[in-house]
Image (cartoon, grey):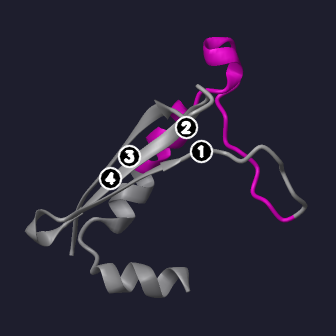
Amino acid sequence: MITDVRAWEALDSRAHPTVGCVVTVEGGFQGRALVPTGASVGRFEVADLRDGGTRLAGLGVRDAVERIRGALAADLIGRPVRAVEDRLA
């Protein structure tokens, strides 16, 4: 069962803002990830969700982090991990 979802803004190896996330399940086990963007955007690649504006040259990801902390976390917390895997298939 997923018990917690946390997200934050981090810097990748090129010092570009990226999303960091940790998902905690029963027993305290955690999965962590940073999600840096690639250098190229192919035809089938998903576009980045960037904040725009002047902060961090418009490359900030605070909006994406808030979406994870809000709606996505609310949808995931309390679900069995297997149920999430099935939804992604």
Asked whether the beta carbons under mark 3 and mark 1 sit within 8 Å of each other, the answer is: no
The answer to whether 26 appears left or right of 52 in the picture is left
Circle 4 packing at 10 Å, graded few (<14), some (14-19), many (20+), is some
The picture quadrant where one finds residue 1 is bottom left
Residue designated by label 3 = 69
C-alpha gap between disc 4 and disc 2: 14 Å
Asked whether the beta carbons under mark 2 and mark 1 sit within 8 Å of each other, the answer is: yes
In the foreground, 40 or 86? 40
Residue designated by label 2 = 18
- Is 55 in the magenta? yes
Bounds of the magenta segment? 44-69
Residue designated by label 1 = 36
C-alpha gap between disc 1 and disc 4: 15 Å
Mark 1 or mark 4, which has the lower sequence index?
Answer: 4
Circle 3 packing at 10 Å, graded few (<14), some (14-19), many (20+), is some
Quadrant of the snapshot with the C terminus = bottom right
Circle 2 packing at 10 Å, graded few (<14), some (14-19), many (20+), is many
Mark 2 or mark 3, which has the lower sequence index?
Answer: 2
Residue drawn 59% across the image and 44% down it: 36
Q: Residue 54 at x, y = what percent?
A: 68, 11
Helix, strand or loop at mark 2: strand
